[in-house]
Amino acid sequence: VCSSDLERRASYRFDVHLPVALHFEGRTVPGFTQNLSGRGLFFYSDAVIEEGASVELTFTMPSEVTLGESMPVRCRGRVLRAAPAQNGQRNGLAVQFDSYEYLPADEVEPVSQFVRVSVAVGEGNVRPVPR
């Protein structure tokens, strides 16, 4: 078993659809998550970013991940996988977190409305993803 396979399973992944703000190259682009763990996330955005690129994300980490209250966070990480848009979907990006910090509620910038192409389970609903 490869160590990266073990690392991928080391953190429980949740199927959660939340707005996210992607910050890179001096601009901010909205997106929405498909799944999330304490180590990273997969999300959709109109942004085209290469694998290995450093990015910053702001969003509200749900209570299922924090094991406490839902908290606004700023995460810095790198793009592990970039899936180009297909069949009307937006670009998919897998980001591994290098660091994150909790933010005061008044520091979180609102994420503009982003129309999803995929069907959500329900706004704010969180379900574990079977592995």
Image (cartoon, rainbow, N blue to C red):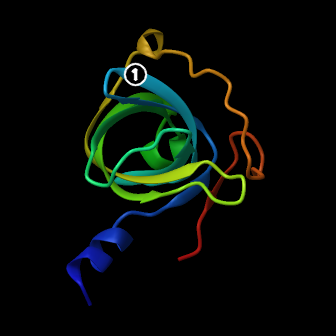
122 or 116, nearer to the observer: 116
Q: Residue at x 49, y 61 (%)?
A: 13
Q: Residue at x 41, y 12 (%)?
A: 107
Percent coordinates x, y for residue 123 in the rendering: 74, 40
Query: Which quadrant of the figure has residue 76?
Result: top left
Secondary-structure class at tag 1: strand
Percent coordinates x, y for residue 101 in the rendering: 29, 30
Residue 100 is left or right of residue 67, and the answer is: left
Residue with the mark numbered 1: 27
Residue count near mark 1 (Cα–Cα under 10 Å), binned few <14, some 14–19, many ≥20: few
Residue 3 is left or right of residue 87, and the answer is: left
118 or 99, nearer to the observer: 118
Q: Is residue 46 above or below residue 93?
A: above
Percent coordinates x, y for residue 67 in the rendering: 46, 46
110 or 83, nearer to the observer: 83
51 or 116, nearer to the observer: 51
Q: Residue at x 56, y 16 (%)?
A: 110
Q: Which quadrant would the N terminus be assigned to in this image? A: bottom left
Q: Residue at x 68, y 40 (%)?
A: 124
Q: Residue furthest top?
A: 106
Mark count: 1
Q: Is residue 23 above or below residue 62?
A: above
Q: Amino acid at mark 1?
A: Arg
Percent coordinates x, y for residue 85 in the rendering: 59, 54
Q: Residue furthest bottom?
A: 1
Residue 127 is left or right of residue 38, and the answer is: right
